[in-house]
Image: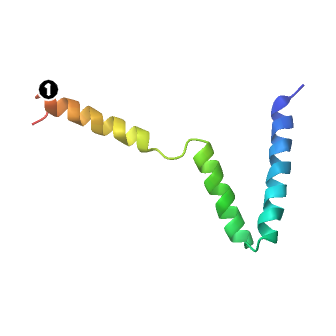
Amino acid sequence: MNTYSLETGMYAQSTGMETEALAQSGFSLEEIASLLKLRDWYQHGGSDRVELVRHLEFLKFLVKTGKLP
């Protein structure tokens, strides 16, 4: 059984119900699209701040060890 297709179908159905509920609450199509995009962004990785923090921690390490003045 292809679970990916099943999960994708359930996600699409869920998103459709959420879209209808938001539309009935008075949100425009553009606002609904933005809300769904933001939700997906936060649920699937959020931002790339972790990578930035790693770079800053590495620079801090280099300064503490005297390898970077």
**Residue 40 drawn above or below residue 33:** above
At mark 1, the secondary structure is loop
> Which residue type does callout 1 highlight?
Thr
Q: Residue at x 82, y 70 (%)?
A: 24
**Residue 66 drawn above or below residue 37:** above
Q: Residue furthest right?
A: 1
Q: Residue at x 62, y 44 (%)?
A: 43
Image x and y of residue 34, in percent: 65, 63
Q: Based on the displayed image, in which of its 4 quarters is residue 56 positioned?
A: top left
Image x and y of residue 49, in percent: 42, 44
Circle 1 is placed at which residue position?
65
**Residue 42 drawn above or below residue 5:** below
- Name the one closer to the observer, 65 or 68: 65
Q: Based on the displayed image, in which of its 4 quarters is residue 28 positioned?
A: bottom right
Report the quarter where the N terminus lies: top right
Q: Residue at x 37, y 42 (%)?
A: 52
Image x and y of residue 22, in percent: 77, 65
